[in-house]
Image: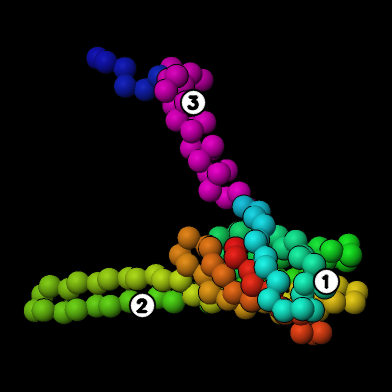
Amino acid sequence: MHQILPPAGRRPARQGWRRAVCLALMSVGLASCASTSDIFPLNAAAKQIGEPKIKFVREGIGRGPVTATMPDGEKLTGHYIVGSNGFVGTSFSGAQVASAIGIGGGTVQFVLRGPKTEMLCQGSINVAGHGNGQCRTTDDARWAIDY
């Protein structure tokens, strides 16, 4: 009679390797991605202030934290929210059924607040999580932003 299972307490060498690969892939998939934005002044007020540094943490769940550091050192914080576009289609023909799901880009919006500055940013985003839009302060300084 052939032994199918390894002796108690022993694992085949391949199983440990597979477990390590699975854990590595899971940790990469669950890790958040932090990224910065390219920002360009659009009016005289924005040119006078300078370019803020805006950072996103992409969590893969349609929302996440955003921070900005103004040129004078003021820290602004907020959260972005993504509104995704998508569709579901179903077709029936006798006993046959066909379904389709489509996911597209969408819109992104966030408000950043600090001790003396408040900034509203709005734009569009693609399926890969990149996009562009505009940010403006309550004093009407405006920047174009690529993320």
Q: Which residue is mark 3?
A: 16
Residue designated by label 2 = 87
For image coordinates 61% across by 49% down, the residue present is: 31
* Residue depicted at 63% across the width and 69% down the height: 145
Q: Is residue 69 left or right of residue 7?
A: right
Residue at 32%, 70% (x, y): give it: 101
Between discs 2 and 1, the one toward the N terminus: 1
Q: Residue at x 68, y 76 (%)?
A: 42
Q: Looking at the picture, how far across and down is residue 110, in whole percent?
A: 68, 75
Question: Looking at the figure, which quarter contains the C terminus?
Answer: bottom right
- Which amino acid is tagged 3? Gly
Total labels drawn: 3
The residue to which callout 1 is attached is 49
For mark 2, give the secondary structure: strand
Residue 19 shown in magenta: yes
Q: Locate the N terminus by quadrant.
A: top left
Q: What is the C-alpha distance between the residues marked 3 and 1?
A: 56 Å
Residue 22 sits above or below residue 36 on the image: above
